[in-house]
Image (spheres, grey):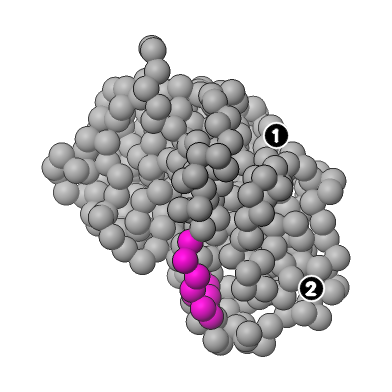
Amino acid sequence: MTLSSASAHPKKACCVPQAARASSRTPSVPVFQDRQLCHASGYEDMVLIGEGTHQIGADDSETHVADGEGPVRFVEVDAFWIDRYAVSNRQFAAFVAATGYVTEAEAEGWSFVFEGVATATAKKRRLRGSVPQTPWWLPVRGAQWRHPEGPGSHISARQDHPVVHVSWNDAAAYAVWAGKRLPTEAEWEIAARGRMQNFRYPWGNELRPDGGAQCNIWQGRFPDENTRQDGYVTTVPVTAFPPNGYGLYNMVGNTWEWCSDFWSPVWHQAENALTRCNPSGPPEGTDRVIRGGSHMCHHSYCNRYRNSARTHTTPDSSLGHIGFRCASSAVVDL
């Protein structure tokens, strides 16, 4: 398969190329609706966020208007649980071992790897073609969740890092197996804000209060120089950096996270019950929402490591900087 046959398209001014696979397959999610295959993980390592009215959205100087970060609005949501951490390689490996699940990157034989970390073997196994506007993304044969920088790399020493190279379909399959679901975009942002309103980041308005790093984003000059000030080149452990006010880790930076919603830059702008009461996004679409930014985000070109920042890609896309965490709307005694 070549890159041209995969019809890769760049995200304008962002770090998320889209990859329409050469052949689409039926998502594996329905398989795991057999409860004998499901792993009911309960609420350990999850945080309960009570029902109520929450302010989301932003309209300050840092927002990307075309992304639909605004308007600032109030939404009502029912109580929900959300994972304290992004799903790790160890957790995803348990899912694969229990079910035999094959990710879309594995089935198609390739995924996107950042050129700056691609192994020598990965560069030799690069597919023909390039991604306009984001040439640092290489489509590499054999890149997948076990080999995040391509053949020659492995997750053996990164069991507590977030799993990457998982598509939306892969993430949804894991969530069903775990007895959970992907969070809605509104739930994700409410959780990211950590009990605070009108702040840019989960910890406040300053990116580096007192000079200390609060999240894993690009340090240096993108894409040529990474100073590695935090000691890592790509992802950090899911427990890294201080948690926010809800006790949630790495809600911004490290890896983008899939949400359940279809993408639209305008759907949520209307004032009605669908957009303000347990909003779950448009009823249909081609792309799915991702939130939170990643270790590749840099202020010079993609400052989407903020509470309100949002972007999107196709549900079959997989890259070395997209992961996920799960949520649950199970009834609980408050």
Q: Is residue 19 magenta?
A: yes
SS for dot 2? helix
Dominant SS of magenta comes to loop
- At a point 47% along the width and 46% down the height, the residue shown is 33
> What range of the chain is rendered magenta?
18-27
Quadrant occupied by the C terminus? top left
Quadrant of the rendered structure where residue 280 is?
top left
Give the alpha-carbon distance from disc 2 to disc 1, as whole Å. Answer: 28 Å
As drawn, 10 above or below 149: below
Single out the residue that lies furthest toward the left: 272
Q: Position of residue 11 (x, y in %)?
A: 47, 69
Q: Position of residue 292 (x, y in %)?
A: 51, 46
Mark 1 belongs to which amino acid?
Ala
As drawn, 334 above or below 259: above
Quadrant occupied by the N terminus? bottom right
Is any part of residue 149 visible from this angle?
Answer: yes
Q: Which residue matches tag 1?
A: 240
- At a point 73% along the width and 80% down the height, the residue shown is 126
SS for dot 1? loop
Mark 2 belongs to which amino acid?
Ala
Numbered badge on residue 122: 2
Q: Position of residue 64 (x, y in %)?
A: 38, 56
Q: Tell me which numbered mark, 2 or 1, is placed earlier along the sequence.
A: 2
Q: Is residue 272 magenta?
A: no
